[in-house]
Amino acid sequence: MTDVSTSTLRRVSKHVIPLLFLLYLFSYIDRVNIGYAGLQMNTELGFNPAVFGLGAGLLFLGYVLFGIPSNFLMKKIGGRVWLSTLAIGWGIVALGNALISSEAMFYGMRFLLGLAESGFVPGMLLYLTQWYPQNERGKVVSTLYMATAVSVIVAGPLSGAIMQMDGLLGVSGWKWILILEGIPPILLGIFALRYLPERPETVEWLSADQRDWLVAELAEGEVTQGNKGYDTFQAALRAPIVWIFGLLYFLLGIGFFSVMIWLPLVVKQLSGLTSVQVSFVSAIPFVFASICMTLYGRHSDRTNERQWHLVVAFLVGSAGLAVSAASSDPVLGFVAICVAAIGLWSATGVFWPMPTSFLSGSGATGGLALINSIGILGGFVGPYFVGLIRNMTPNFSTALYSVAAVQLLAAVVASQIHRSTVVRAARTEIAAR
């Protein structure tokens, strides 16, 4: 890389990444904190595992409905205003989750939270294409996706500490979790409305040389992607490869969100620890996951290879889940969960640079949201499926085996992408255009 490219990207990252990271961090905290709240909420409100699994999963069903329209709205309104608005909106709904008092209200509030959050991830991915060339996105996406692991690292101890406020002002500890963890995205959204940069052409903190280099680099990337990929939403919608990546993200989502939502209850069963102790111990797998996914994303960028990095990550995730299910030793079972988290989170870091390599323009606007919407259904299916199985069995072993099998299937699908007839057909269609 040249001096101007290095200095430009360093300056962009300084102004873009910290705020996006914090927004993404709290979006995930407000998704996964229900796992910690559930340690007390389920007992207080009489929710069984099936009810809890369905409620936790309904967030992702709401998530599906608004992802694509949200990205097109962002295209018209601009990333700064739209991402900020989304953060303020989901923070308000997250606060409202503290009002849950029945099964129906649990289902409704989780669905609304998913609806409010649905546009943020595809919007963030689209926003990054306006700031980073393709060959830099693996590292950047891995860095931002580290927020999903850090969110659990933060949410565990934070939720455990907040839960000790149980009874303060007559409010249960689980409600305090949802209240106090719903406030930060509102404040961050207000801050982002003022300080999140819109586009390279509009900022003053890039020099003329830096701005010219970045605008030219992004424009060249758009032309290249337009020539070799799908640059309209209609083309992306018809492209089999887009649906294949949607399937892969769906399979990944089953593992990713099952671990995120159910981990506190799995750890409690493995260890017999108190709820507060569980909230601290549950953070450990994600310390390892956050470190490894960043290193893995950097290695994928450096070698310019995505597919087999994705396959290996799926295999590691599957193996970790299977060993945890088979183990009667709580220490070995917990170590295996750590390995599973490393695999699943590393897969997310190398996944998104793949579809952004062949989607551009309106194809990226709608295509990324479509893939995310298909994949996020795994966030509904996984937690609900685990809850149903756990309701019928004395422990989590059968559920963990099932999720491990899904990740193994994902590895098989990912390994065949380059050989797929539909991919070859896509390449033929692109060449013809």
Image: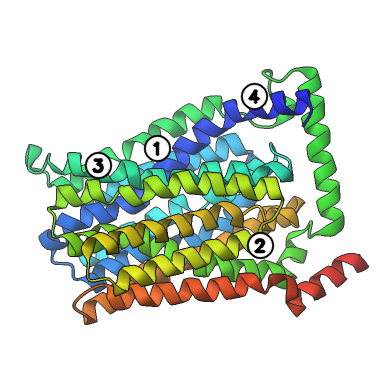
User: Measured from the top left, where is residue 199 in percent x and y?
Assistant: 69, 32
* Label located before the other in sequence (1 or 4): 4
**Which residue is tagged 1?**
185
Which residue is located at x 63 percent, y 66 percent?
A: 245
User: Mark 3: which secondary structure?
Assistant: helix
Which sits earlier in the primary sequence, circle 3 or circle 4?
4
The amino acid at mark 1 is Pro
For mark 1, give the secondary structure.
helix
The tag earlier along the polypeptide, 2 or 3, is: 3
Three-letter amino acid code of the residue under disc 3: Pro
x%, y% of residue 267?
23, 59
Q: Are marks 2 and 1 in contact (CB under 8 Å)?
A: no
Marks 2 and 4 sit apart, C-alpha to C-alpha, by 30 Å
Mark 2 surroundings: few (<14), some (14-19) or many (≥20) residues within 10 A: some
- 21, above or below 12, in the image: below
How far apart in space, not on screen, are marks 1 and 3 (Cα)? 19 Å
Tag nearer the camera, 2 or 4? 2
Secondary-structure class at tag 2: helix
Residue 402 position, x and y percent, is 38, 77
378 sits to left or right of 329? right
What residue appears at the point 44 percent right and 77 percent down from the top-left corner?
405
| Neighbours of disc 3 within 10 Å: few (<14), some (14-19), many (20+) | many
Q: Which residue is mark 2?
A: 307
| Residue located farthest toward the right when viewing the structure as drawn | 432
Q: Amino acid at mark 4?
A: Arg
Q: Quadrant of the C terminus?
A: bottom right
Nearer the camera: disc 2 or disc 3: 2
Count how many numbered circles sit on residues in the image.
Answer: 4
Q: Which residue is mark 3?
A: 157
Specify the amino acid type for callout 2.
Answer: Gln
The residue tagged 4 is 11
In the picture, the disc for residue 220 is none
